[in-house]
């Protein structure tokens, strides 16, 4: 079981019990609402209405983390900690990993009438803690359906500066740039221990270190760069943006053009001169 979609069970697949979800591989644990680990993030969650503070808005879910409840009464009797499943979901936000969302029966008007239904991949847009209705601290996660954002991005671009609003509508808070990890980009980050290959900085988040992966020759048309290690750099956000913008390019000897220093490579991770030349030829200022 891993992050992402399971081809055998597309969104909308229905199940009668947690045991069936487990057997399908969609959600491992029989009891816990969050499946995952601090190392790999959360793979799946079940929205079962166990927490009074949950809000289901359809394409957006405010999901309460786990812990601090009395197993008999179900009432919140202690603060929640940023550990276990809660930390796993925080890792999803930090590293851009999707999480499978499964709704239990009648938890909201978006839920099935009975049993459980897999409702697709969501990204963890934000997380924070607050005092819940019971007076104890709970961790909250804003989950946004990835499909809904893909549909929205087909809207025509804004060609002028809109006047804005003192109280922005919720929609404007959605970040449009989704950076998703693949097995390759995640491995490159791990190999560099989340240190920027340009400046050596490692950003420490409270749940996990943060770095971005940059494809030297961009993915997609017309560039069609490959998602392979020799085409991937582990960068800090600033250097990722500067590299994507062409403010920094790389010379054949791996020295930086537009910044001081040299690309940090290792025996295990070499970068392709062809892709470096491709980027330099098209993005150099
Ligand atoms: Zn950097």
Image (cartoon, grey):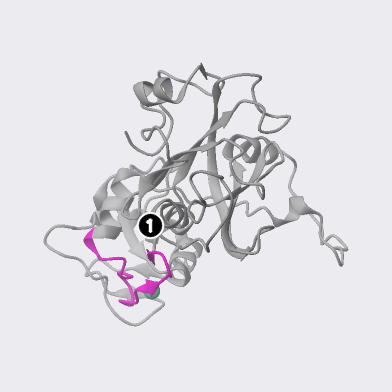
Name the magenta segment's main secondary structure: loop
Q: Quadrant of ligand 1?
A: bottom left
- Position of the N terminus by quadrant: top left
Which one is in front, 78 or 108?
Answer: 78
In the figure, 266 relative to 25: above or below? below
How many labels, in total? 1
Q: From this viewpoint, which residue is outermost toward the front? A: 72
Relative side of 270 to 165, left or right: left
In the figure, 172 relative to 226: above or below? below
Residue at point 67% right, 52% down? 174
User: Does the segment drawn in magenta span residue 198?
Assistant: yes
Residue 205, horizontal then vertical, whole percent: 43, 70
Which one is in front, 217 or 233?
Answer: 233
Residue 219, horizontal then vertical, whole percent: 42, 44
Q: From this viewpoint, which residue is outermost toward the bottom? A: 260
Relative side of 282 to 137, left or right: left
Residue 120 visible? The answer is: yes
- Assess disc 1: are there few (<14), some (14-19) or many (≥20) residues with their C-alpha within 10 Å of its C-alpha: many
In the figure, 239 relative to 127: above or below? below
Residue 31, horizontal then vertical, whole percent: 42, 36
User: In the rendered structure, which segment of residues is drawn in magenta?
Assistant: 191-210
Residue at point 60% right, 64% down? 136
Please identify the quarter of the rendering in which residue 140 is found: bottom right
Q: Please, what secondary structure does the residue beneath circle 1 have?
A: strand
Residue at point 26% right, 66% down? 193
Label 1, on which residue?
213
User: Does the segment drawn in magenta span residue 153?
Assistant: no
């Amino acid at each position: 079981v891993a992050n992402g979609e399971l081809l055998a069970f597309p969104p909308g697949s229905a199940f009668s019990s947690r045991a069936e979800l487990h057997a399908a591989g969609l959600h491992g644990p029989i009891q816990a609402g969050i499946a995952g680990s601090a190392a790999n993030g959360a793979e799946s969650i079940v929205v079962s209405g166990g927490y009074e503070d949950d809000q289901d808005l359809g394409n957006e879910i405010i999901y309460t983390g786990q812990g601090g409840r009395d197993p008999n009464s179900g009432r919140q009797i202690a603060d929640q900690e940023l550990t276990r499943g809660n930390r796993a979901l925080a890792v999803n936000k930090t590293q851009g990993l999707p999480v499978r969302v499964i709704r239990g029966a009648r938890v909201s008007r978006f839920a099935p009438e009975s049993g459980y239904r897999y409702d697709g991949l969501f990204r963890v847009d934000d997380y924070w803690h607050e005092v819940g209705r019971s007076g104890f601290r709970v961790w909250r996660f804003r989950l946004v359906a990835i499909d809904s954002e893909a549909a929205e991005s087909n809207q025509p671009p804004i060609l002028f500066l809109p006047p804005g609003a003192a109280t922005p509508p919720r929609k404007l808070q959605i970040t449009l740039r989704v950076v998703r990890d693949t097995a390759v980009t995640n491995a490159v980050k791990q190999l560099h221990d989340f240190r920027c290959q340009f400046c050596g900085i490692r950003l420490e988040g409270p749940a996990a270190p943060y770095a971005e992966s940059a494809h030297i020759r961009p993915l997609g048309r017309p560039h069609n760069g490959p998602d392979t290690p020799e085409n991937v750099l582990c960068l800090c956000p600033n250097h990722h943006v500067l590299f994507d913008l062409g403010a920094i390019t790389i010379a054949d000897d791996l020295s930086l053009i537009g910044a001081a220093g040299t690309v940090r490579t290792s025996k295990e991770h070499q970068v392709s001169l062809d892709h470096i030349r491709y980027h330099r030829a098209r993005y150099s200022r």
